[in-house]
């Protein structure tokens, strides 16, 4: 048809060349016979050459970084010898002294004249390399974190096959990474959990019902050597291309249980100290009571001496001397008892500036052991602006531990188990600490006697804990009392002297 222009052939070499050039892809051709290298304008630009600059194979190699030069030349020679495709990444030096990543992909081809060429394309991969480097850095950071955290991390797929096994998991379970990955996670569980685990996954896939996902719990694990150990397990879920994956975080509780046993020992020691303190209180009371009859004995003896003064018998002098000695010994005994009473009443204490929040935290680690396992919900509402107190740390922690344990005991049979610990500013430069529970409460008939020595509402209690606690608080210049908790149960409150911020020395 006249004037008709045939459509362009999409496979025309010129069109293809222009398309590559416009896309930022250069072309290259190495004549294997002459070692002459032909570069397209884009390829010249990528190599930092002018478009009309000629280049041969030797010059091309000189443009490469020394570390990449030998590897690239070896790859080219292997491609020529084997007739295989050539694909290699290398760096070239820029005019500014930096390096730039390029990639060349070529194939051995024969020209129309029978000459053999290595022809292909040159691609700028600098951005790709930067992204890869950034990804490696992020992966390195993530791996460093995973290798540092004490909790083991295990990733499994929907069939229970382990896909990731962290360094901490290696330490906890004794399996190497290669021994664990690709195996069923049930190998880390003792029976009957190991036999039931796959059925748990199948039920979840079928029903979607979450029973343990997102909820931490205490279970048993099995090491490579067969030993069973307690662990805390938390499981999370993620989806990748429609496939579920589960991530488990495992914390070895062996040391925790050992620490718990030590806490129980310390608690027993505190009970022992409380008994000694109670004995001290009784000694103080006994000293007070004994001083009166001893004083009466002294008076009686002195009166007897006065009566004997008028006696004229031969042994009167001996009787007078014996009476004098008896009076002296009675007075001496009274002095000893008064010294004992003074020592017991004062005690030995070292008061320093402490943080009330830290005292509560440390006492909680001892006194609230097992609280969460008992279903107790703990809430701490502590005032950070009024936190410094002048106290004997050990004595106040003894008070707190006693209140915490009493609160837990009171809630043993309660349907709702909530403990709230608060601290706030009180009048008279004091700080008030309150411990509230939702236990059985304290009857009105018992509230007035709660702090009396040997009074208790417990079946196995000694009745000295609250009495000792009240004595300690009053020795610090505070007061201690109890009242009904509006939410049910009881609230114990006590005050301590506040310390000014400038007096902070050992609060830490």
Image (cartoon, rainbow, N blue to C red):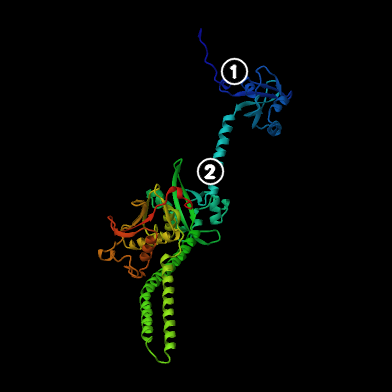
Residue 103: x percent and y percent? 62, 29
Whether residue 348 is situated above or below residue 1 in the rendered picture:
below
Q: Is residue 268 left or right of residue 456?
A: right
- Helix, strand or loop for disc 2: helix
Whether residue 333 is situated above or below residue 35 in the rendered picture:
below
Whether residue 237 is situated above or below residue 282 in the rendered picture:
above
Disc 2 from disc 1: Cα separation: 49 Å
Q: Is residue 331 left or right of residue 133?
A: left
Q: Is residue 369 visible?
A: no
Residue 350: x percent and y percent? 46, 59
Along the viewing direction, whichever of 39 and 392 lies nearer the viewer: 392
Residue 166: x percent and y percent? 54, 49
Q: Which residue is mark 2?
A: 142
Along the viewing direction, whichever of 414 and 443 lies nearer the viewer: 443
Q: Which residue is mark 1?
A: 14
Q: Is residue 73 left or right of residue 283?
A: right
Q: Is residue 442 visible?
A: yes
Question: What residue sits 38% from the left and 86% below the top?
Answer: 308
Residue at far left of view: 444
Residue 25: x percent and y percent? 59, 24
Q: Which quadrant of the figure has residue 243? A: top left
Q: Nearer the viewer, mark 2 or mark 1?
A: 2
Question: What residue sits 40% from the left and 61% below the top?
Answer: 401
Q: Which quadrant of the figure has residue 445? A: bottom left
- Helix, strand or loop for disc 1: helix
Along the viewing direction, whichever of 66 and 104 lies nearer the viewer: 66
Residue at far top of view: 2
Whether residue 329 is situated above or below residue 220 in the rendered picture:
below
């Amino acid at each position: 048809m006249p004037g008709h222009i045939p459509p362009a052939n999409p496979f025309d070499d010129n069109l293809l060349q222009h398309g590559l050039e416009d896309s930022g892809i250069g072309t290259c051709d190495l004549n294997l016979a002459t070692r002459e290298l032909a570069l397209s304008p884009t390829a010249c630009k990528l190599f930092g050459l002018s478009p009309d600059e000629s280049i041969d194979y030797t010059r091309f190699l000189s443009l490469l970084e020394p570390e990449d030069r030998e590897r690239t030349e070896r790859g080219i020679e292997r491609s020529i010898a084997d007739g295989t495709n050539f694909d290699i990444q290398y760096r070239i030096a820029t005019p500014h002294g930096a390096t730039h990543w390029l990639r060349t992909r070529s194939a051995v081809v024969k020209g129309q004249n029978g000459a053999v060429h290595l022809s292909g394309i040159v691609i700028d991969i600098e951005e790709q390399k930067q992204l890869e480097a950034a990804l490696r850095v992020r992966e390195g950071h993530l791996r460093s974190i995973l290798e540092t955290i004490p909790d083991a991390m295990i990733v499994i797929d929907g069939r229970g096959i382990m896909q990731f096994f962290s360094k901490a998991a290696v330490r906890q379970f004794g399996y190497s990474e290669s021994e664990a990955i690709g195996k069923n996670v049930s190998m880390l569980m003792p029976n009957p959990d190991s036999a039931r685990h796959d059925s748990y996954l199948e039920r979840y896939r079928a029903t979607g019902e979450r029973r343990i996902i997102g909820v931490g719990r205490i279970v048993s694990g099995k090491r490579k050597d067969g030993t069973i150990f307690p662990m805390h397990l938390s499981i999370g879920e993620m989806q990748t291309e429609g496939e579920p994956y589960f991530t488990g975080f495992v914390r070895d509780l062996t040391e925790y249980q050992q620490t718990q046993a030590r806490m129980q020992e310390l608690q027993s020691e505190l009970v022992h100290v409380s008994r000694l303190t109670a004995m001290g209180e009784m000694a103080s009371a006994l000293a007070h009571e004994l001083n009166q009859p001893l004083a009466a004995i002294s008076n009686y003896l002195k009166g007897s001496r006065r009566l004997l003064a008028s006696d004229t018998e031969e042994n009167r002098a001996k009787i007078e001397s014996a009476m004098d000695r008896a009076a002296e010994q009675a007075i001496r005994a009274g002095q000893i008892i008064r010294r004992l009473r003074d020592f017991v009443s004062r005690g030995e204490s070292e008061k320093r500036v402490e943080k009330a929040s830290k005292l509560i935290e440390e006492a909680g680690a001892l006194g609230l052991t097992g609280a969460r396992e008992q279903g107790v919900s703990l809430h701490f509402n502590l005032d950070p602006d009024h936190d410094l107190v002048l106290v004997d740390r050990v004595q106040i922690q003894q008070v707190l531990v006693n209140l915490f344990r009493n609160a837990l005991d009171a809630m043993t049979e309660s349907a709702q188990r909530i403990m709230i610990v608060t601290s706030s500013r009180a009048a008279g430069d004091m700080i008030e600490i309150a411990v509230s529970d939702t236990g059985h409460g304290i009857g009105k008939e018992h509230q007035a006697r709660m702090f009396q020595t040997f009074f208790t509402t417990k079946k196995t209690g000694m009745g000295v804990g609250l009495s000792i606690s009240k004595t300690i608080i009053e020795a610090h210049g505070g007061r201690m009392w109890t009242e009904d908790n509006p939410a049910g149960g009881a609230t114990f409150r006590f005050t301590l002297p506040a310390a000014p911020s400038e007096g902070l020395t050992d609060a830490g």
